[in-house]
Amino acid sequence: MPDLYYLPGSAPCRAVQMVAQAVGVSLQLHYLDLMAGAHRSDEFTRINPQRSIPTLVDGSLALCESRAALMYLCDRYVKEEGGDDGASLYPRDIIARATVNQRLFFDACTFYPRFTEFYHPQVFGRAAPDGKKRASFERAVELLNTFLGESEFVAGPNMTIADISLFATVTTACVLKFDLQPYANVKRWYDRMLETCPGAQMNVQGAKEFLTYK
């Protein structure tokens, strides 16, 4: 059973939890209180010198980037043959997988950073909202809206790990009162993810915990 060092309010941590549930992998959860400095302990630093969460440990392997962990869970635990076994979450087809990767890197390099740049100063520093940073995040949501105008999910007709990774962050934004109504495609997709994504309710509850952090 893989170990996951996590904090429920962290969107990347919840993405790993949801993908693990989707592929049928049980995780041994280790709550890591970053606000209390638990990530700076000698024990955790030996596991992950970056001192970051989520950290997934499976045997001798330790992964400390959430999107890498999502890819690994699918490559390691999803069987190619059989019925509805989750193979569409991270398709083997090179073209389909390239699209999923592009959306994952959009999440990692554009969407999630713009989310944190706008919201983290408000949550952790109690700063007033920054108009420029809000506009930057809104442009990222517009891009997501464009992607979702091309297909039902962000990388094609089926839910993939890219959807789950983005869903975790969008959920936190919604808990923080970001309005999806102006983004019709994102709103449609988000409602569908709430209904169909494994672990969706856990994701919502974890996002609510984010509001309690300081």
Image (cartoon, helix red, strand yellow):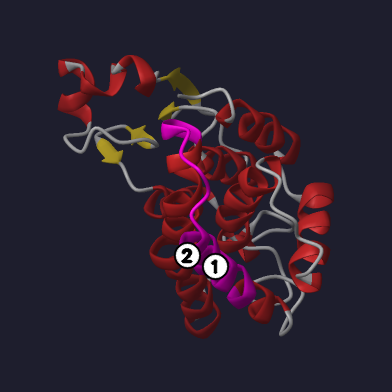
**Image quadrant where one finds the C terminus:** top left
- Asked if residue 44 is positioned above or below residue 177 in the image, the reply reads above
What's the mark number on residue 117?
none
Disc 1 element: helix
Determine the residue positioned at 63% across, 75% down.
142
Q: Is residue 129 magenta?
A: yes
Looking at this view, is 46 or 60 the one in front? 46
Residue 179, located in which quarter of the rendered image?
bottom right
Give the amino acid at mark 2: Lys
Spot occupied by residue 150 in the image (x, y as percentages of width and height): 71, 85
Q: Is residue 26 left or right of residue 132?
A: right
Determine the residue positioned at 61% across, 54% down.
164
What's the mark number on residue 132?
2
What's the mark number on residue 135?
1
Label 2 and label 1: CA atoms lie apart by 5 Å
Magenta stretch?
Answer: 123-143
Looking at this view, is 191 or 72 the one in front? 191
Disc 2 element: helix
Spot occupied by residue 59 in the image (x, y as percentages of width and height): 31, 32
- Asked if residue 100 is positioned above or below residue 95 in the image, the reply reads above
